[in-house]
Each structure stands twice: as structure tokens, then as C-alpha cells.
Image (cartoon, rainbow, N blue to C red):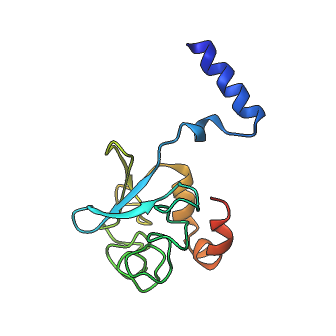
Amino acid sequence: MQRLRAISAILMLLAGANPAQAQEPEYLLYGGKDQNVFLGCLNCSRFDSSSIWNQLGPHGSEFDNATIWSKTGIYGSPYQELSPWHPHSFEGPEVRDKTGKSYGKFTRNPFDDQTKVESLLWILNNYDYVIANLSAVRQRY
């Protein structure tokens, strides 16, 4: 079994894939006071309808009030407590996988239970760049 995993990892590297990323779960974002409002998938393809990167989907629009990209919405404004972009909020959304396992909060507030997932931290720590270059950043997903 160990040998099979090693061969699989080598084949993935040769194909240009990162084995750690290939085994990464889908990071699902849940917000609201009770963390029960689905806000989208953080690391799904921009073609996935549940992805926050799909600008035509319900979770990737900049114009829908219930997305993290709406600068004036309850989940997207840096001035709203339920938004991941509010730097001092303790009410930010939670990151979970499909089994319900928590990966911490998707929040800019480092004093809250902030996620430790590096790719998600990059988004949080580079909010100004991401929001100013959202179209270009979407192309990465």
C-alpha cells in the first residue's frame, strides 16, 4: 500500500500536480450567527456552481448581498461583524469539510480561531490585493 502511494505521488508530480493539494478536502464556508448559512466552497474550481470563485454562481457574485465579495453585503463588507474581512470581528464564517470537520474560522482577525490552512490564509492576508484584482485571482482557481 505504501509503495502504491509513493508511485501515485510520483506520477502526480510528473503530471504537474501537487500531492498535498490533491488530497486537500473541499473547504466549505459557513457563516451567520449560528454558522449555518452556506457561503460557498473556498477551493473549488471557478467553474463549480458552489465556488466562491464562480462569478456567475450564487456564492461568487460581487452583487449578491449574501456573498463574501459584496463590499456592502453582510458577509462581504469589512464593516460587518459576519464578514471574514472585518479585522476585529469574532463572528466570521467557519471553514469545514464535507464531514463537518472544522478548519477554524475564515477571518482576518488573528485573535479569533483563525484557520491555519495556508492557501486560505493567503486570501485573508492579501484581502486588499484580492478584492482589487478579483478577476485575475479568480483565474487561479
Q: From the viewer's side, name the closer residue of 86 and 138.
A: 138
List the single residue furthest toward the right.
14
Q: Is residue 131 left or right of residue 89?
A: right
Percent x, y of residue 48: 53, 59
Residue under the point 78% across and 32% down: 14
Q: From the viewer's side, name the closer residue of 95 and 141.
A: 141
Residue under the point 38% across and 75% down: 75
Which quarter of the figure has residue 123?
bottom right
Reply above or below: 135 against 95.
below
Q: From the viewer's side, name the closer residue of 109 and 92.
A: 92
Percent x, y of residue 17: 69, 39
Q: Is residue 93 left or right of residue 46?
A: left
Give the total of numbered labels: 0
Reply above or below: 37 against 10.
below
Task: Give the position of the N terminus as an image quadrant.
Answer: top right
Q: Is residue 9 left or right of residue 43?
A: right
Which quarter of the figure has residue 11?
top right
Task: Give the position of the C terminus as an image quadrant.
Answer: bottom right
Percent x, y of residue 52: 50, 65
Residue under the point 53% across and 55% down: 44
Which quarter of the figure has residue 131?
bottom right
Reply above or below: 14 against 32.
above
Percent x, y of residue 21: 59, 41
Residue under the point 55% across and 50% down: 118
List the single residue furthest toward the left.
34
Reply above or below: 62 against 138.
below
